[in-house]
Amino acid sequence: MFKFDMQIEQNFASFYHRESGKAVFVDSFDNEEFDVRVGTLRESEFVATVHAHNDNELNDKLYEVTARYL
């Protein structure tokens, strides 16, 4: 299981999944709505926007929306 450790106060984070060779990129302008992309440094695709109000909720939702891509 891949573990995310993003904090809700962060505006941007990236995570590298060694087994699949893919990266997850997360960014937010308001720290409530987070856009999630999966791919490589050269090419990534938008997979979802998640809404979260605390760190645990954010990390759980990141896992949920990226699990099938990694």
Image (spheres, rainbow, N blue to C red):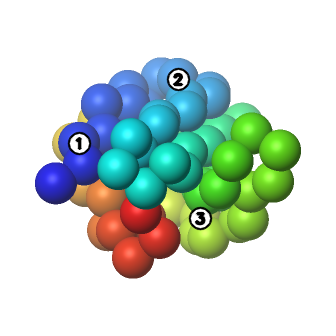
The CA span between labels 1 and 2 is 17 Å
Q: Which amino acid does label 1 sit on?
A: Lys
Q: What residue type is labelled 2?
A: Gln
Other residues around mark 2 within 10 Å, as few (<14) / some (14–19) / many (≥20): some
Q: Which residue reaches farthest left?
A: 1
Q: Mark 2 points at which residue?
A: 10
The residue located at (52%, 23%) in the rendering is: 10
How many numbered badges does the structure rendering display? Answer: 3
Q: What residue type is labelled 3?
A: Thr
Q: Residue 48 or 57: which is nearer the viewer?
A: 48
Q: Are marks 2 and 3 in contact (CB under 8 Å)?
A: no
Other residues around mark 1 within 10 Å, as few (<14) / some (14–19) / many (≥20): few
Q: Is residue 21 left or right of residue 17?
A: right
The image quadrant where one finds the N terminus is bottom left
Decide: is 59 above or below 37: above
Q: Do the residues labelled 1 and 2 touch (CB within 8 Å)?
A: no
Measuring from the top left, give residue 37's x and y in whole percent. Answer: 65, 56
